[in-house]
């Protein structure tokens, strides 16, 4: 039944919805409740598989990879003709202007899309709730990003981010494995750091998903005290054996499984963590909006799907509001989290799907004919591009 509906979507020139993330991309059609595909943001060029977003690449290489990636989305995954079809891109508000121009050039000139709309991921996520005001925290692969949305307007001046997300967990897993793990090869055990094994990002992510979890707040407090020299007894999490190919097994102790995700909640040298992002954003908000934001917190992103994440985040907030930094500045003591009608990793995409189904889509889009005339890709859409 789903395939039949998807076929109808493809045949009726329904808008294509694309959410390009650093690690994964969601693609599908407007009006659908879930993306047709969630795929790695990688391309294979001349037999070499590489990430679309390579920090060391120049604009020419990025253009080549992005063009090939868009072609794959259209013809391999969405299986739809790209010509004269509207496109909605779910983007970060801090996307470089050069990237937006490049994406518009590829879609509107090369693939001849009829129109192109950019929707900030934080704003798109609020469409899934039917609410115009919310505090949206996106915990993805590279960063945790927070931005309030008030009456349907993104408050970009309050945008904040920290490099505590999926990539940070991967680095922590690799570090802890080298310190604590064992490798079993041909029936012999040896320390991981002596086994000359290099783990790819895909393997690290698989270990994160299959083996790691986030500790409850009371247990995390005990672990933190023990790190500082306390000797409070606590039962270590059970170890697991992770098969690495046919010839090797990684023996992952409980300390690795439990401590890998603590990087999300440990404060950095400036006292910042994912929990303080929320509290600092509330402090920066006007007094009449603080209560609304605290009652309408929406957490999205694939890393937020880690077992125990939301429960731990709420406990961290309840603890931090009572410490000296916030107790006399923030009167709010309770926080309420929304449960969106989609998995957290594609909530932003679902918002784009809703937006792409509205009659107002064309009035909020860059029209191909106008773009070919003036080449303008506005940072903030005013409606003039559709005129």
Image (spheres, rainbow, N blue to C red):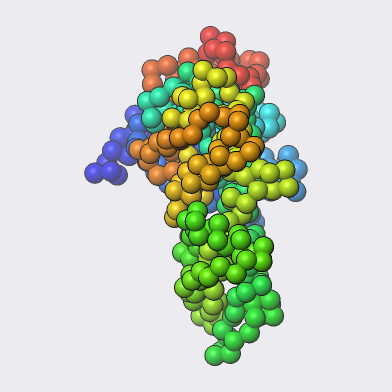
Q: Position of residue 184 (x, y in %)?
A: 56, 84
At horizontal 52% and vertical 41% (from top left) the residue drawn is 317
Q: Is residue 204 left or right of residue 358?
A: right
Is 54 situated above or below 33?
below
Where residue 25 appears, x then y in whole percent? 51, 44
Toward the viewer: 229 or 174? 229
In the image, 207 versus 81, the foreground residue is 207
Q: Is residue 244 above or below residue 332?
A: below
Residue name at image x 49 percent, y 56 percent: 218
Is 64 drawn above or below residue 214 in the view shown?
above
Whole-percent x, y for residue 121 in the image? 52, 33
Name the residue: 63% across, 84% down: 190
| Numbered circles on residues, count | 0
Q: Residue at (38%, 21%) from the top-left corner? A: 358
Q: Position of residue 330 (x, y in %)?
A: 57, 29
Given residues 133 and 250, the one toward you in this image is 133
Q: Does the image show residue 38?
A: no
In the rendered view, would you say 8 is above or below 360?
below
């Amino acid at each position: 039944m789903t395939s039949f509906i998807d076929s109808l979507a493809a045949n009726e020139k329904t808008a294509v919805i694309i959410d390009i993330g650093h690690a994964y991309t969601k693609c599908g059609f407007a009006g659908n409740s879930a993306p047709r595909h969630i795929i790695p943001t990688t391309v294979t060029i001349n037999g070499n598989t590489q990430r679309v977003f390579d920090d060391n690449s120049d604009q020419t290489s990025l253009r080549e990879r992005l063009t090939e990636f868009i072609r794959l989305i259209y013809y391999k995954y969405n299986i739809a003709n790209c010509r004269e079809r509207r496109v909605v891109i779910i983007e970060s508000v801090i996307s470089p202007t050069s990237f937006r121009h490049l994406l518009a050039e590829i879609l509107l000139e090369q693939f001849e899309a009829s129109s192109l709309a950019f929707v900030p991921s934080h704003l798109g996520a609020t469409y899934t709730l039917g609410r115009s005001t919310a505090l949206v925290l996106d915990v993805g692969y590279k960063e945790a990003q927070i931005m309030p949305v008030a009456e349907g307007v993104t408050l970009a001046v309050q945008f904040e981010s920290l490099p505590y997300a999926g990539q940070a967990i991967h680095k922590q897993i690799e570090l802890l494995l080298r310190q604590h793990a064992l490798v079993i090869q041909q029936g012999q055990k040896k320390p991981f750091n002596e086994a000359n094994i290099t783990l790819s990002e895909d393997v690290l992510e698989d270990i994160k998903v299959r083996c790691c979890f986030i500790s409850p707040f009371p247990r995390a407090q005990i672990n933190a005290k023990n790190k500082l020299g306390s000797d409070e007894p606590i039962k270590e999490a059970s170890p697991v054996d992770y098969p690495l190919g046919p010839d090797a097994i990684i023996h992952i102790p409980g300390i690795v499984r439990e401590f890998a995700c603590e990087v999300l909640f440990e404060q950095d040298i400036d006292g910042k963590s994912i929990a303080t992002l929320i509290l600092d954003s509330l402090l920066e908000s006007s007094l009449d909006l603080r209560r609304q934001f605290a009652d309408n917190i929406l957490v999205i992103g694939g890393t937020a799907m880690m077992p125990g994440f939301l429960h731990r985040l709420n406990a961290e907030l309840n603890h931090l509001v009572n410490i000296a930094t916030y107790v006399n500045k923030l009167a709010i003591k309770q926080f309420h989290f929304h449960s969106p009608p989609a998995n957290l990793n594609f909530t932003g995409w679902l918002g784009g799907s809703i937006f792409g189904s509205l009659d107002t889509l064309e009035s909020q889009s860059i029209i191909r004919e106008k773009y070919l005339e003036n080449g303008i890709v506005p940072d903030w859409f005013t409606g003039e591009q559709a005129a």
